[in-house]
Image: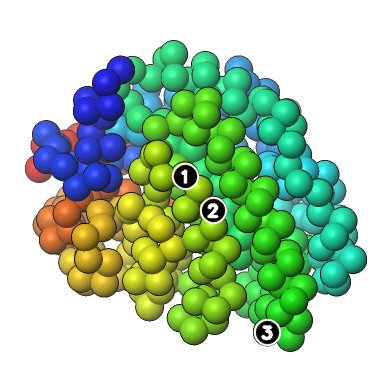
Amino acid sequence: MDDTTKVLLRAARGEAVPHTPVWFMRQAGRSLPEYREVRAGIGMLESCRRPDLVTEITLQPVRRHGVDAAILFSDIVVPLQAAGVDLDIVAGTGPVVASPVRTMADVEAIRPLEPEAVEFVAEAVRQLKRELGPTALIGFAGAPFTLASYLVEGGPSKHHVLTKALMLGAPDVWHALCTRLADITRTFLRVQVDAGVDAVQLFDSWAGALSEADYRRSVLPHSASVLGSLSEVPRIHFGVGTAELLAAMSEAGADVVGVDWRTPLDVAASRVPGKAVQGNLDPAVLFAPWEVVEQEARRVLAEGTKAPGHIFNLGHGVLPETDPDVLTRLVELVHTV
Ligand code: 1CP
């Protein structure tokens, strides 16, 4: 399929589009009964390693909602496990690491990712490319900071205290860790691009916990080394609570900057001149009456016109309790405005 027919890629490049493209972070997941059905009795990481299941789950929201992009069903910790880190995704909690990383010796035990160790991802991408037609396929990875936060804390964290203590107190260990994580992330995204994904999203979900100065000093060079290696596909760079980091995150090499709901897209656009934006309906708005959803979606669409390109999305992932019919209706609305 010719790239020019993929509306999402046109918007990412700031080209004219027949309608605003739309997809949803976490569109594949617990909000869909068909997802809960195929996942029954299969662990999260186990399901990520089965190409047939990955293909089916990735396609579910495309069939149901008619979104303009599929996002590969996987998780940011998949390449870490494939590189030998002992971790699991615990239902109701998230990623849990058996031996948290705190010292230079811990860092040196993290091996590079061999592309063959994520062959199951390449296989799923090839299957998906045969099925998707004009729908774009987005590959993704976690950025070094967000991956480091799980490895250092040992699991999900509210304040990222141990991560920041390492970053500020032992910068040599921190940079060694992020150098290794950037290397793993580059390999993971390279496998996906070589197998055929149309665009990539780098999730630095928790970077918004940092000041701009700390972000620029301790994080940006590592994310830039990832994004700089992938210039052949549009690159989306996303984090939560990143209003003050948007300019720095766009300098890391993104073509599209993802924005959460706290920053209006016209304000975001003024902070990342020349770049397309993605976002940013508050996922909680989907629980309000339809009239409110419609009004807020129209506001987001109007504000998005201030950027050279706009990919409609939520400001963060779909919440598991979301009514999927509201998402379907929202896609129809975005396509007709
Ligand atoms: O069994 C389950 O259903 C577990 C829930 C789940 C799912 C559906 C997890 C555990 N990961 C996923 C899939 C996933 N993870 C996708 C699928 C594609 C899609 O979006 O449709 C993606 C893109 C991710 C990426 C991911 N994992 C991020 C970045 C995106 C974001 O939400 O900011 C992060 C931070 C993770 C870690 C993670 N994995 C799972 C959970 C519950 C978490 C977050 C834990 C925390 O709060 O720290």
Query: Which marked residue is nearer to the observer: mark 3 or mark 1?
Result: 1
Chain-order first, disc 2 or disc 3: 3
Q: Which mark is residue 168?
A: 3
The quarter of the picture where the C terminus appears is top left
Query: Which marked residue is nearer to the observer: mark 2 or mark 3?
Result: 2
Q: Amino acid at mark 1?
A: Leu
Chain-order first, disc 3 or disc 1: 3
Residue at 26% x, 72% y is: 271
- Residue 173 relative to residue 157: left or right: right
Q: Are marks 3 and 1 in contact (CB under 8 Å)?
A: no
Task: Where is residue 329? Give x, y as percent.
Answer: 24, 37
Q: Quick one: 105 or 139, which is closer to the camera?
A: 105
Q: Which residue is mark 1?
A: 230
Query: Quick check: is the Cβ at mark 3 less than 8 Å away from ligand 1?
Result: no
Q: Which residue is mark 2?
A: 226
The image quadrant of residue 189 is: top right
Q: Are marks 2 and 1 in contact (CB under 8 Å)?
A: yes
Task: Where is residue 241? Give x, y as percent.
Answer: 43, 71
Q: Characterize the local packing of mark 2: few (<14), some (14-19) or many (20 or more) Cα atoms within 10 angstroms.
A: many
The image quadrant of residue 245 is: bottom left
Q: Which mark is residue 239?
A: none
